[in-house]
Amino acid sequence: MKMQHREHAWMGLGAALMMCAGGLWSVPEAQAAGFANTAQSGTATGMGGVATANPDEPNANFYNPAAMVFSEGFSAYVGPTLIKPSVSYEGQGVEEQTEPALFPPPNVNLTLPFGEQYAVGLGVTLPWGLAIRWPDNWVGRENFRAQQLQTINVNPNFAYKVPGIDLGLAVGVQAMYSTITQERTVILRDDLEVPVLLGGQGFGVGATAAAFYKLNSQWSMGLNYRSAVNLNYEGRAHFGEEVEGTPFEQRFVDQGITTELTVPHTVNLGLGYQATEALWVGLDLNYMTWSTYDRIEINFDEQSPEGEPGESEPPTVVEANWNDALAVRLGAQFAITDALKARVGFAYDMTPVPDETVGPSLPDNNRTVGALGLGYEVAGFRADVAYQYIYLPTREIRNGSVDGDYQLSSHLVGINVGYGF
């Protein structure tokens, strides 16, 4: 039984790495399903994430770098997305709530066209992530208490405009640095609870490719692809001092851990239509290959106390078995004046997390998103503000992790400023 407690502790890091990947200060309710964070622009956030075929999108480096060749000059665009999540739990006569939190993942975009056919861009975004904290004494603390995944994605892109046709093409590189921490409690006896802190950092490289085509003065199409990225983590498990001087001390030894994790391929297809001089509408389809999360294997540096000399702790395998998922986004922008624009959006995003493996670290569900936004631009300066409400229906967990009913929701406020010349 003691060894089972230890094995469960090791599985905590695997579950954390399986449930999360990339995305600094992101949360389980951040716009896209799973642990994706697609809220990288005040303009796009105000239209429910619609951006792939929008010629006016200021963070084109993230949403469609091929559109950069249609920019008129250098531009810089920066800002945070403020995310306030809420998760409640009800089960076995107990009601719990995650601790209040506000997360501000930033985004940065630089675009520089040169010549008549070329452009380069550099983006720093946080496209994947998870952060959640339950109270220290909550009923499910032995399964899971808190975690935070942080990832920085540095993404340079090069774009080329095909001569004689309004078609832009782009390729780029993704360089990701990711860190993760998870906390849980191991209950060894009624009078002995040991806090466990698991953490690690990982690196990975991927690619991007995009196309943007203006069919005519009214219609535009966009395609943006972001490759999967394999993140190789090196971490460490630390057990609280409560275990010192007990019969369990030699079984709970601080040691190094390694694992790897692959964030999914992402394909975005967009269609834009300039309906009138003032009204633009757009449709986006987003597809993510979450099935890359089938399992996570965690390897240990140290020898098992029960093992033969030279024998290391056997790997722990955590099953995930996630599914690929599709999101549909519809947005509109209306020019009230030459300088002031109003935006509205709606999205429906399907969850990739199956009933068999869903847990309290990410009790995800299909989500419905409503969005509003405003933009103001004058003399090269622009400012965008957006609000989103994300609603997820109650997720019933009945797989033996921490069974109960989980209700999630989130408020997002995107604030960006930019300048171009």
Image: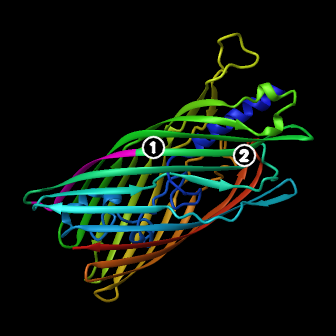
Q: Residue at (86%, 53%) from the top-left corner?
A: 92
For residue 168: magenta? yes
Residue 241 lies in quadrant = top right
Residue 338 x %, y %? 28, 87
Q: Is residue 253 above or below residue 19?
A: above
Query: Residue under circle 1?
Result: 264
Decide if residue 391 is on the left or right side of residue 59: right
- Neighbor class of circle 1 (other Cα within 10 Å; few <14, some 14-19, many 20+) is many
Answer whether residue 379 is magenta in the image: no
What residue type is disc 2 on? Phe
Residue topped by disc 2: 144
Instruction: Give amino acid for label 1.
Output: Pro
Between discs 1 and 2, the one toward the N terminus: 2
Query: 10 Å neighbourhood of mark 2: few (<14), some, or many (≥20)?
Result: many
Q: Quadrant of residue 295?
A: top right
Please state the horizontal and vertical placement of residue 415, each as a whole percent of the image.
45, 73
Judged from the image, the secondary structure of the residue bearing numbered disc 2 is loop
What is the magenta range?
A: 165-175
The number of numbered badges drawn on the structure is 2
Q: Residue furthest bottom?
A: 337
The residue at the point 31 percent across, 89 percent down is: 337
Dominant secondary structure of the residues highlighted in magenta in the image: strand
Q: Is residue 337 visible?
A: yes
Query: With respect to residue 239, does 342 lie above or below?
Result: below
- Tell me where residue 57 sits by quadrant: bottom left
